[in-house]
Amino acid sequence: MIIKEEQWGTVPLLHIVDEQQESSEMPVVIFFHGFTSAKEHNLHYAFNLAKKGIRVLLPEAHLHGVRSEALDEVQLSLRFWEIILTSIEEAGFLHQQLKEKGLLNSDQIAFSGTSMGGITTLGCLSAYPWIKSAAVMMGTPGYVKLAKGQMKQFENKGFKLPMKDEDVHKLLSTLAEFDLTQHPERLNGRPVFFWHGMNDTMVPFEPTRHFYNAVKVKYNEHPEDFEFMVDEHAGHAVSRPGMLRAVDFLADHLND
């Protein structure tokens, strides 16, 4: 197994693959990291996926890791949605690059991520019908609701939003385009795995469970394609069983 630091266009990434299959067409997972994290922090997912014959790309999110601009956490949080929207746009570029480089086996591509990366994954599912499956850890599909909650929390801490009302309206309108709670039909029966801890104070558990319960009727013919693994004790950290189940879910649906 090899781990390569590469630059695809403007996107730094880690490329993980079995050495004997480095140049072969094969299934691919693009895995997004969380807020204030970095691409190398999810190598345990990549290692376990690569063992199952999957190529993994770990892109560095805008303003994170080697793309950092030395912003503090408050400054970074104000650009949270800029980061996510940039990752969604760059996902389309990475997909095109995989095809041009002859590395992607047909349509066998899945997306995954933790926290901010899980939120990004859900936005990608809304934007790109060519994604075959996804695994979402501690993510939420309700972009607009989450953004409004973040703004309220920011103001409750005594900060003033550095945005005009019309800019807030424009942002919320843009986020609505990627909000799966407003466009659940865009899942179109694609396999999706969710993991969430019930005691998560960073990305609330209940909105994700509500979305899952509302949509799962669409999967009545294939309930195995829509799975929610709940950890009653966990907070904002994925358990090892959750990580391993996510890996198995992605591998099962990419290799079927």
Image (tube, grey):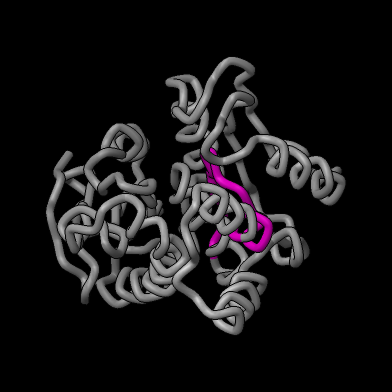
* Side of 186 relative to 5 (left or right): right
Residue 146 belongs to magenta span: yes
Q: Quadrant of the C terminus?
A: top right
Q: Quadrant of the N terminus?
A: top left
Residue lying at 26% horizontally and 48% vertically, measured from the top left: 39
Residue 164 % position (x, y):
53, 80
- Residue 221 seen anywhere in this rendered image of the structure: no
Residue 69 % position (x, y):
19, 63
- Nearer to us in this view, 159 or 136: 159
- Residue 158 seen anywhere in this rendered image of the structure: yes
In which quadrant of the rendered view does residue 67 lie? bottom left
- Nearer to us in this view, 167 or 84: 167
- Nearer to us in this view, 71 or 245: 71
* Side of 145 relative to 200 (left or right): right
The number of discs equals: 0
Residue lying at 37% horizontally and 48% vertically, measured from the top left: 35
Q: Which residue is most to the top?
A: 233
Residue lying at 61% horizontally and 55% vertically, measured from the top left: 152
* Side of 13 relative to 50 (left or right): left
- Nearer to us in this view, 236 or 212: 236
* Side of 17 relative to 113 (left or right): left
Q: Which residue is most to the front?
A: 158
Residue 16 % position (x, y):
23, 47
- Residue range in magenta is 131-147
Q: Is residue 79 above or below residue 198?
A: below
